[in-house]
Amino acid sequence: MNKLSGQLPSRSFKHKCEWCNSEYLGTKFSTLCSRRCMYEQRKSKNWEIVVCKHCAIKFKRRKNERHARTGKKRMFCSSACHLHSDYQKQKVTIWANSPKNHWNNSETQKKVKETKLRVHGDAGYNNQEKSQATMMGRYGVHSPFCLPSARSNGHRISSVQRRVFEEVKKKHKDAILEHYLSDVKLSVDIFIPETKQVIEVFGDYWHMNPKLYNKHDFNINTKLTAEETWKKDTARLNKLQSAGYDASVIWENHTHTT
């Protein structure tokens, strides 16, 4: 019987399904044994397996999907790989030397010189060594361009997260702000390599602090209830802990710690 039509053909032929390789009886020109195999084959034609240009891990992308502005296909398996890639660094360099860079604007340069003159008494003041030392001390990189564009997965890093990181950095010099853990495929707020410690900084609104919200409250931005948000966050922490990381949470108002 042909599983596609549900009827026994007048003359049956033995075939091997092109998708699942199972043997079946069908019409002379039949190639698939069932509707399920037909749908799976169609879906496979819309996707392709490619290698990430940064970490070399294979990932799946849509064949016909292109970036709305650049017209390019997806090249990286995650936002973290994109932000830390040589491709992104080249883009930053090109932008820095382009007219779109607001620092190249004459009005901006004039204001900067006025501020330097007022604060340091020198319109051309530029203590590069001090700037690099400050960046290394606070964030572990020598330039703000080496940070993930002050963003995490497309979202701006909050001032709360930065304050917590600066406090952690005083005790743990190897602490990293916004780090991608490839083994669990998660980007974490703060990571301490020496102790495998992960610190997640939860905003009261975005993560629906249990001290401020009840389980039925709805977040119009995330489209989740507080209870759904808590379950999602708990699953994330469990995944980190199962992988051997010491994961903990610091809430925005510091009144509730997990």
Image: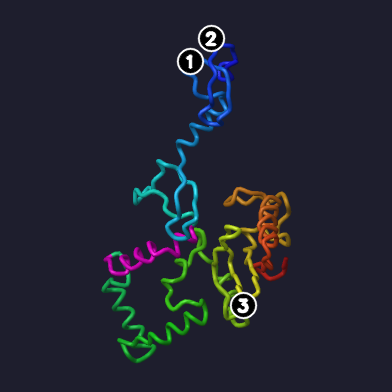
Residue at (27, 66) in percent of width and height: 98
Which circle marks residue 95 in the picture?
A: none
Looking at the rendered structure, the secondary structure element under dot 2 is loop
Of helix, strand and loop, which one carries label 3? helix
Q: Residue 60 in the image: x percent, y percent? A: 49, 46
Q: Which residue is farthest front?
A: 14
**Residue ID at (51%, 82%):** 137
Name the residue that disc number 3 marks.
168
Write the start and end of the magenta stretch as one range. 79-99
Q: Residue at x 32, y 69 (%)?
A: 96
Measure the alpha-carbon separation of dots 3 and 2. 75 Å
Mark toward the viewer: 3 or 1: 1
Q: Earlier in the sequence, mark 2 or mark 1?
A: 2
- Front position in the image: 182 or 233: 182
Side of 103 where 155 appears, left or right: right
Q: Amino acid at mark 1?
A: Lys
Residue at the spot 42% in from the left edge and 76% down from the top edge: 143
Give the Cα distance between marks 2 and 1: 8 Å
- Circle number at residue 28: 1
